[in-house]
Image (cartoon, helix red, strand yellow):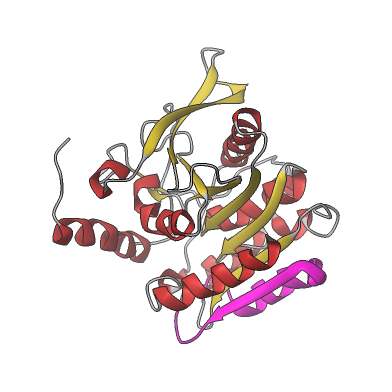
Amino acid sequence: MRKLGTLAIAMIIGSLQIINAQGIGLNAEAEYPITPADYGLNFEEIKIETPDKDAENNNVMLFGWHLIPNDKTSRKAMIIAHNGQGNMSYALEYAGVFLGLGYHVFMFDYRGFGQSDEFKVSNKFYIYAQFATDLSAMVDYVKKYHATMTCSIFGYGIGGGLALGVGANSVKVFSVIADAPYITLEKIEKTHKEMTGEKIFMPLAFDKALVEPGNALPVKGDHLRGILLICGANGDLIKAEDVAALADYKKKITSVYTVPGVNNDMNFESNKDEYYKQVKSFLDKLN
């Protein structure tokens, strides 16, 4: 496989911010501009079968990577749910945070992204309800093939909301870290309309108690050991007060990291060292 230089890698990872700046609609990419191999990481390709069927009555297959830490005896797993911009390759720098903390990292692409099975993804949509099914299948995969590992989820953007919804619904999930999670899709739709004057489309007839944290956390999630919520102090679509409202649902186990002076697209980029410290501090308290 062709190796990329340091500058090329930095440009590829940095392009995530460009994608985010283009809007909140989904932006699916099939090609991986970078892989764990370019970083010299120890990993394996994995395939995850979802419980639902495609148009030809076949189970949907998702593509992913299992990144293996230096301590192969580690019994900690972190699933990454990305933000629907590009594909999972743009989340590799996040993966490095958890890999450095000794976690087995499981990355995957939603249907319609990367090398996962085909699915029509429109940039007019904020999210599809099927993505919650995909994340749930990833949780089931980890606990099936790595049963002795604790299974946590890190999600950012739409992945943050999905992480909270799926995490609250599955007793297999140990903890959740959600960066810029939505509360409800209706709130996102309304705020986006106020900000831009344009409509962003949402799924119809979906399970609100699975997809929306604002409906999941009040009635589910008592099994979770901890929740870390991350939000930019100047967040516009996802506001700091929205995240504070989410925190109120599970006060005893929830911590909030408010990133000073930024919108949510810069939560990680603005101060990577502090981001790492906040995540490490949260996880250390659970283990």
The picture places residue 283, in percent across and down from the top left corner, at: 62, 64
The picture places residue 282, in percent across and down from the top left corner, at: 63, 69
The picture places residue 257, in percent across and down from the top left corner, at: 59, 77
Seen at 76% across and 58% down, the residue is 225
Q: Is residue 238 visible?
A: no
Q: Nearer the viewer, residue 276 or 12?
A: 276
Numbered circles on residues, count: 0
Horizontally, residue 198 falls left or right of residue 217, namely: left
Q: Nearer the viewer, residue 5 or 83?
A: 5
Horizontally, residue 27 falls left or right of residue 12, namely: right
Instruction: Please tell me whether residue 239 is drawn above or below residue 62 in the rendered image.
Output: below
Q: Looking at the rendering, in which quadrant would you find the C terminus?
A: bottom right
Q: Looking at the rendering, in which quadrant would you find the N terminus?
A: top left
Q: Nearer the viewer, residue 275 or 120?
A: 275
The picture places residue 21, in percent across and down from the top left corner, at: 34, 66
Residue 207, by quadrant, is top right
Instruction: Please tell me whether residue 190 is drawn above or below residue 58 in the rendered image.
Output: below
Horizontally, residue 141 falls left or right of residue 90, namely: right
Q: Which residues are magenta?
A: 236-262
Q: Is residue 97 visible?
A: yes
Q: Going by the picture, which residue comes out furthest to the bottom?
A: 261
Seen at 51% across and 59% down, the residue is 156
Task: Reply yes or no: does residue 13 show up in magenta.
Answer: no
Instruction: Please tell me whether residue 140 is drawn above or below residue 245 in the rendered image.
Output: above
Task: Reply yes or no: does residue 250 show up in magenta.
Answer: yes
Seen at 76% across and 45% down, the residue is 169
